[in-house]
Amino acid sequence: MNIEDARKTYSSVIKDFWTERNSLFHQKEEAEKKYNETGDTTFSQQAATLELSFQAVDEKYNEYKDFMSKIMELHSSVSNMESSKQQGEAMAEYAEDLAKIMEVARRIANGDIVPPQDEQKLIEYDPELYMSAKNMALMNKMKKKEKYESLWDDEEPTEPEDPNEIADNTEVPYELPEVVSVEEVVSTATAEQS
């Protein structure tokens, strides 16, 4: 099961257990209040049964809640790791492009012939550097000119993947708690009391 599916499954289960937990707590308090008012032991027994059911539901609720916390930490870790990886790749790509820009400027300054798209990239990056390189080229006019191929591939840039999407699709490496219904937990707790 991937993280996204686990989050959906267990958040729904947690909500059900939270609702039942609150309901049992209020029912138990009401039964205790009626016992204190009337002294009727039926209410005392009802409160005791509700307390056992509350404890069983609360235990399961906490188990699911703790598991969900682990899942959320894992999601956050995977997402952060992917973001860091993408930032590192972007920085490496930027450094590579900067080195290419500087090489194009050097070639132009030497009076060599560079492809128009390389010249355009230099203009876009730093118009002043381009003009400086062109001025240097005028001074190097007498020198034999070399003709170069483009330093940039014609690859289209790819859109980086969403780190949250990658995290959502990561498989959960933990043992998944068995999903049981609130009714099963309550009936088991009630049966154990009998």
Image: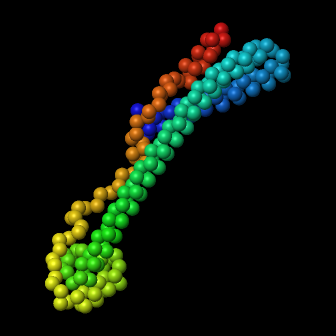
Q: Quadrant of residue 149?
A: bottom left
x and y, in percent, of residue 1 in the image: 41, 32
Q: Is residue 119 visible?
A: no
37 above or below 101?
A: above
* Res. 69 image quadrant: top right
**In this orientation, which residue lies closer to the viewer: 47 or 175?**
175
Visible residue check, residue 43: yes
Residue 72 horizontal/vertical position (percent)? 51, 41
Which of these two is toward me, 59 or 185?
59
Q: Residue at x 17, y 74 (%)?
A: 148
Image location of residue 59, percent across then percent down? 62, 25
Up/down of 59 relative to 98, above or below? above
Tell me the residue at 15%/77% (across/down). 147
Above or below for 57 versus 155: above
Lateral position of residue 93 relative to residue 175, left or right: left
**Which quadrant of the figure has residue 38?**
top right
Instruction: From the viewer's perspective, tell me whether residue 15 is left or right of residue 159.
Output: right
Residue projecting furthest to the front: 143
Name the one closer to the observer, 172 or 44. 172
> Looking at the picture, how far across and down is residue 74, in whole percent?
49, 40
